[in-house]
Image: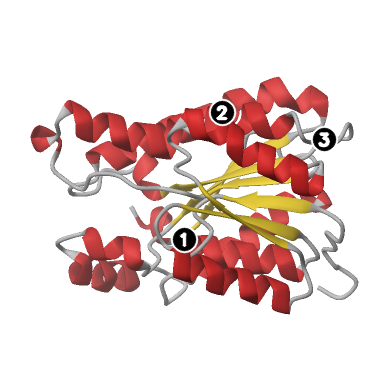
């Protein structure tokens, strides 16, 4: 790796769901590369503030933006705050996620709509508002997906479908925005032991089985996902257009 240095000094990045877990790791990794960071959060104010302090400790400017990104009516205000503070935006990381963990036959329309809105549909207004602030030379949009977009996982029907929709949107947005110099890609992450996994009734079983089946010998850390985001946010990925990179330690190639 000698001679390779990702320097994003002067860039400004929005990380949705940036207060904890994978989002926090992404925010800090981008800050270490020189980005100023806008941290979006919904409920977790204390962790968001702690992440903001960690960004400042790395010498970067930080904005704390409370907003439900699934509510398109609120998004305009979020981007107005960014515009007022910075004037422009270079990178959007769509990481905020939620969803109902239930068998498909137990899902209601409300369950389905909530999950699709936050995990997939939110990407459209994020791109609409965000690209309006991106400089003429272009920018980056990176979405965090999961292996459930392609694989059947117990109780994951709604979330898996939403992630599949997210990856499809990535491809369509990538084609539309590439002529403007905006590169749109996604990362499909394997199992990461974060707070989100606590909602699964079979959490312990998932962790044990995933570790056993991962050729790399361990589960992902949030920093593993953050490293992939950093790559996609950098000039090293200039010819990555509409791609979904799998980061899972080899789990998905094991059948």
Location of mark 3 (residue): 138
Check contact, mark 3 vs mark 1: CB within 8 A.
no
Q: In what element is the residue under mark 2? A: helix
Q: In what element is the residue under mark 3? A: loop
> Which tag is nearer the camera, tag 2 or tag 1?
2
- Residue drawn at (71%, 73%), measured in percent from left and top? 56
Q: Which quadrant is the N terminus positioned in?
A: bottom right
- Per the model, the C-alpha gap separating discs 2 and 1 is 29 Å
Colour scheme used in the picture?
Answer: secondary structure
Instruction: State whether residue 172 is above or below residue 251.
Output: above
Q: Depth check: give the residue in front, 134 or 45.
A: 45
- Residue drawn at (46%, 70%), measured in percent from left and top? 46
In percent of width and height, residue 111 lies at 21, 35
Location of mark 2 (residue): 125
Q: Residues within 10 Å of mark 3 (few under 14, many from 20)?
A: some
Q: Is residue 87 left or right of residue 233?
A: right
Q: Earlier in the sequence, mark 3 or mark 1?
A: 3
- Per the model, the C-alpha gap separating discs 3 and 1 is 29 Å
Q: Residues within 10 Å of mark 1 (few under 14, many from 20)?
A: many
- Residue drawn at (76%, 43%), measured in percent from left and top? 84
Q: Depth check: give the residue in front, 80 or 151.
A: 80
In percent of width and height, residue 217 lies at 42, 77
Q: Which mark is residue 248?
A: 1
Q: Depth check: give the residue in front, 202 or 109.
A: 109
Q: Depth check: give the residue in front, 195 or 51.
A: 51
Q: Is residue 189 left or right of residue 177?
A: left
Q: Residues within 10 Å of mark 2 (few under 14, many from 20)?
A: some
- Residue drawn at (37%, 57%), measured in percent from left and top? 254
Q: Is residue 194 visible?
A: yes
Check contact, mark 2 vs mark 1: CB within 8 A.
no
């Amino acid at each position: 790796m000698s001679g390779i240095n990702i320097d994003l000094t002067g860039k400004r990045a929005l990380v949705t769901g940036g207060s904890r877990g994978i989002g926090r790791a992404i925010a800090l990794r981008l800050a270490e590369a020189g980005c100023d960071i806008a941290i979006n959060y919904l409920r977790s104010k204390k962790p968001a503030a702690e992440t903001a302090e960690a960004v400042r400790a790395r010498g970067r400017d930080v904005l704390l933006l409370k907003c439900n990104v699934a509510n398109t009516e609120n998004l305009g205000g979020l981007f107005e705050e960014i515009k007022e503070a910075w004037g422009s935006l270079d990178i959007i990381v769509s990481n905020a996620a939620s969803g109902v963990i239930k068998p498909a036959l137990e899902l209601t329309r409300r369950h389905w709509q909530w999950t699709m809105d936050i995990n997939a549909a939110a990407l459209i207004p994020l791109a609409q508002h965000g690209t309006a602030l991106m400089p003429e030379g272009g920018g980056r949009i990176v979405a965090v997906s999961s292996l459930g977009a392609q694989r059947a996982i117990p109780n994951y029907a709604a979330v898996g479908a939403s992630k599949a929709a997210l990856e499809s949107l990535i491809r369509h947005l990538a084609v539309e925005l590439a002529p403007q110099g905006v590169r749109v890609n996604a990362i499909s992450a394997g199992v990461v032991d974060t707070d989100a996994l606590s909602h699964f009734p079979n959490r312990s079983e998932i962790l044990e089985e995933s570790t056993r089946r991962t050729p790399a010998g361990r589960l992902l850390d949030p920093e593993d996902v953050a490293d992939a985001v950093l790559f996609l946010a950098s000039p090293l990925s200039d010819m990555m257009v509409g791609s979904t990179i799998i980061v899972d330690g080899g789990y998905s190639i094991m059948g």
